[in-house]
């Protein structure tokens, strides 16, 4: 299995809603990532988990809360988002913690109304 | 500041021709470079990588060239096919291990004409 699976593929939420994005990989990778991508822009790093511990937080607002329940799963909890948070949220994993050879999921297209 | 950029925002090529996508980087400390392909509705897909101790690396139909003197990276695609139509990102990695930082370039759209 060489895939990173993300659910849901699309999500529409209001500014008062609470929702969660989910990511799963079964490649035995020890690093997992959340990226945010706006249309026609490169991905921007949000969080990095290494060996299930948060190792990098790129000054992301607290309305985004990551969670790594085990080595295969990565969640992103969303609360009180703003319309400008609408974007494609990408999960990725890599065999090593050096951010080399990232394997990306197809992303969750999020719209905040 | 340090940045990774691309010379052209779009590239249109005839099917069967070779494509060359260029990328400039400014961080001389970068030691690892990657090309990603992103098709519509999908996440970026790893294409090929190269370390700073090499100047050329070949894959299946793709070749990456690295010129550290002028801080230039290029991706060559041989016999371009319609399935190659996508946005291509170069990325540079600086540091190592848990201190590594991956920076993506702006992206270039490759459009293949039938």
Image (cartoon, rainbow, N blue to C red):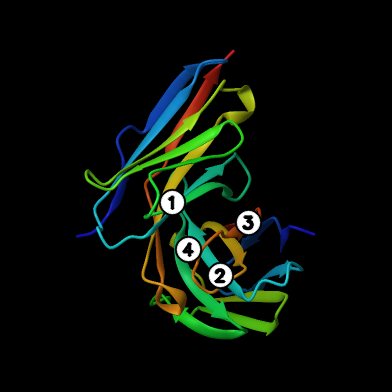
In what quadrant of the picture does the C terminus of chain B appear? Answer: top right
Q: Residues within 10 Å of mark 4 (few under 14, many from 20)?
A: some
| Mark linked to residue A42 | 1
Q: Earlier in the sequence, mark 3 or mark 2?
A: 2
Is residue A91 in view from this perspective?
yes
Labels 3 and 1: the sequence-earlier one: 1
Q: Nearer the viewer, mark 4 or mark 2?
A: 2
Residue sticking out furthest to the left? B1
Subunit of mark 1?
Answer: A
Q: Which residue is label 4 attached to? A: A85
Q: Is residue B95 above or below residue B23?
A: below
Q: Residue at point 65% right, 53% down?
A: A106
**At x 54% / y 24%, what residue is drawn?**
B78
- Mark 2 or 1, nearer chain start: 2
User: How far apart are the two marked residues, 3 and 2, measured between alpha carbons?
Assistant: 12 Å
Residue in the foreground of this view, choosing between B8 and B76: B76
Element type at mark 1: loop
Q: What number is the disc on residue A33?
A: 2
Q: Nearer the viewer, residue A57 or B68?
A: B68
Identify the residue under disc 3. Answer: A107
| Disc 3 to disc 1: CB gap under 8 Å | no
* Tag 2 near tag 1, CB within 8 Å: no
Q: Residue B56: horizontal and vertical position, in percent? A: 43, 41
Quarter of the picture holding the N terminus of chain B: bottom left
Q: Are marks 1 and 4 in contact (CB under 8 Å)?
A: no
> Mark 2: which secondary structure?
strand
3D distance between C-alphas at marks 1 and 4: 15 Å
Asked whether B4 or B98 is in front, the reply is B98
Q: Is residue B69 left or right of residue B34?
A: left
- For residue B20, the mark is none
């Amino acid at each position: 299995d060489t895939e990173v699976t993300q659910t849901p593929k699309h999500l529409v939420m209001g500014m008062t809603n609470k929702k969660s994005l989910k990511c799963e990989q079964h490649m035995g990778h020890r690093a997992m990532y959340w990226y945010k991508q706006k249309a026609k822009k490169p991905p921007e790093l949000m969080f990095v988990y290494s060996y299930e511990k948060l190792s990098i937080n790129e000054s992301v607002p607290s309305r985004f809360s990551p969670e790594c329940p085990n080595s295969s799963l990565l969640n992103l909890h969303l609360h009180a988002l703003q319309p400008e948070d609408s974007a494609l949220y990408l999960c990725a994993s890599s065999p090593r913690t050096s951010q080399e050879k990232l394997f990306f999921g197809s992303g969750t297209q999020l719209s905040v109304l | 500041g340090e940045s990774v950029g691309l010379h052209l925002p779009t590239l249109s090529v005839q099917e069967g021709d070779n494509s060359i996508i260029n990328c400039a980087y400014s961080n001389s400390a970068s030691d690892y470079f990657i090309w990603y392909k992103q098709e519509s509705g999908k996440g970026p897909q790893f294409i090929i990588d190269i370390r700073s101790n090499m100047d050329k690396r070949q894959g299946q139909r793709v070749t990456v060239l690295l010129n550290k003197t002028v801080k230039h990276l290029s991706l060559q695609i041989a016999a371009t096919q319609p399935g190659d139509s996508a946005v291509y990102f170069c990325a540079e990695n600086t540091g190592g291990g848990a201190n590594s930082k991956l920076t993506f370039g702006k992206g270039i759209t490759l459009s293949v004409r039938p």
